Amino acid sequence: MDDQAALIARRVALAAAAWFNAPADVEAYRRLAAAVGEWNAYASPQLEDSDVDELLDDLADVTPPTPLGQGVAELEAVLRRQARREL
């Protein structure tokens, strides 16, 4: 945890303790909500804006998509063969 995260985490903990000790205190709840919002903003991953092609786009060239029913039918056939052997 870096210094900024530790500072924000401390603010969240202090605000939570204040609200826990006085749950009817609107200002304490506002500080808790603000601290949690600050933590969420800091801890959320930030995606880079890049125009990189999707990694999965090339998979269709290697293995084209198949209808779901075809894959299920093949799986069903394998399971039925195994079940017959076990009987």
Image (cartoon, rainbow, N blue to C red):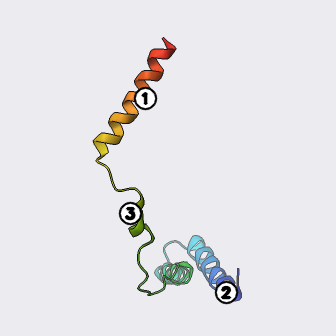
- Residue 84 at x, y = what percent? 44, 16
- Residue 34 at x, y = what percent? 50, 84
Q: Seen in the image, is 65 located left or right of residue 31?
A: left
Q: Mark 2 is on which residue type?
A: Leu
- Residue 62 at x, y = what percent? 42, 59
C-alpha separation, residue under disc 3 versus residue under disc 2 = 49 Å
Local crowd size for mark 2, using a 10 Å CA cut-off: few (<14), some (14–19), many (≥20)? few
Q: Are marks 3 and 2 in contact (CB under 8 Å)?
A: no
Q: Earlier in the sequence, mark 1 or mark 3?
A: 3
**Quadrant in the rendering for residue 55:** bottom left
Q: Mark on residue 31?
A: none
In the picture of the structure, the residue carrying the numbered disc 3 is 61
In the picture of the structure, the residue carrying the numbered disc 1 is 78
In the picture of the structure, the residue carrying the numbered disc 2 is 7
* Residue depicted at 48% across the width and 85% down the height: 48
Q: Earlier in the sequence, mark 3 or mark 2?
A: 2
Q: Mark 1 is on which residue type?
A: Val
Name the element at disc 2: helix
C-alpha separation, residue under disc 1 versus residue under disc 2 = 57 Å
